[in-house]
Amino acid sequence: MGAYLFDQFKQIISEKGFAAGENAGIIAPVMANMPVVLLARWDAAAVLTAIDRYHVTGLVAVVDGLLEIMNHPDFSQYDLRSLRSVTVSSFVTKLNVDIRRRWEKLTGVTVRENSYGMTETHTSDTFTNSMQTDDMDLKSGPGFCGFPVPGTQIKIVDFATQKPVPLGEEGEIAIKTPSLMKGYWRNPEASRKDIVDGWFHTGDIGMLDKEGYVHYLGRTKEMLKIKGMSIFPTEIEGLLAMHPAVDGCAVIGMADLKKGEIPVAFVQLRPDHQGRITEDELASWCLDNMAVYKVPAIRFINNLPLTDTGKVNKKVLYSRL
């Protein structure tokens, strides 16, 4: 029997991250009859020690934590051969092919990205298991989330009519699942609005591609309108994450009289690239790698502001426009 290591326990369990952290780090391994190693706070050396000492087979972490582990000066002194499964969430730093290759070279294990879900459903609404061959999951377009888990149905509907849209078109993600909540506590109006005929209307923008894979594109309120074109911050963030100098980034919209909005990317550089690239140079790279209307204004930031659950706090970024 292996052991399951769940890092950043207090961080991910807190506030909105409660259900996701509970499911991925506690309930799933316990239901699989596996002991769980919980850490009260994040510490790369403690993670390495726990994997070595308890022969941990499964690790749940964030991408930034994985990088800290790989960059730890004593990494080679720990035995990580027991690891069989590594699942990450991309908050500040996004999982990319280079990070996956580096981790595979060091441990022999492929990193899998967490999938889409909501607390109102059962959190884990899609899965990406076995979709890492040839990095298919990372190369299949923005917001790739895999297939719905067994027993869960997902459809993409028009926001106004609530009727399904054709495959490949964007719309609202609606979910039907046996574990759907009964309703919001003491808020029947919101419950009636969001739960229609057993379907939960998430308010999230998504797409089902022609193969049936789910793509999460962002919240409705986060979508940018630039000269009439709909732009999703997650797509720009994913493209920026491919640049070797980018450690983390977050894109928000800024009002513009001519274009309606323009995307602004707050970029946190990797320590070894600070001072070696300018905002204009990164903007030029964007011009070569994305459609012109998607190219953001670049603003370097020392550290991206985070919420208690480790996500980028975009409210703080809006105050810095």
Image (tube, rainbow, N blue to C red):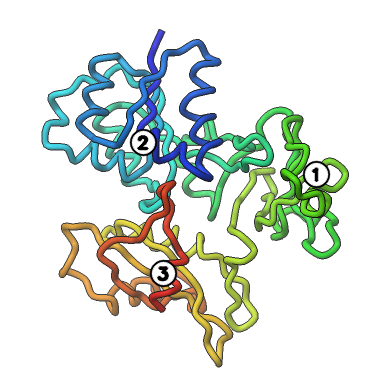
Task: Give the residue drawn at x 16%, y 69%.
Answer: 276
Query: Where is residue 269 drawn, in percent x and y?
Result: 26, 62
Identify the secondary structure beneath mark 1.
strand
Please tell me in which quadrant of the rendered image residue 207 appears.
bottom right
Measured from the top left, where is residue 215 in percent x and y?
A: 61, 50
The answer to which of marks 1 and 2 sits earlier in the sequence is 2
The kind of secondary structure element at disc 2 is loop
Q: Which amino acid does label 3 sit on?
A: Leu
Residue 166's label in the rendered image is none
The amino acid type, in three-letter code, at marker 1 is Trp
Distance from Cα at disc 1 to Cα at disc 3: 34 Å
Q: Residue at x 19, y 41 (%)?
A: 71
Cα distance, mark 1 to mark 2?
33 Å
| Residue marked by disc 2 | 8
Q: Is 288 left or right of 210, judged from the image as shown?
A: left
Q: Which part of the image, by quadrant, shows the N terminus?
A: top left
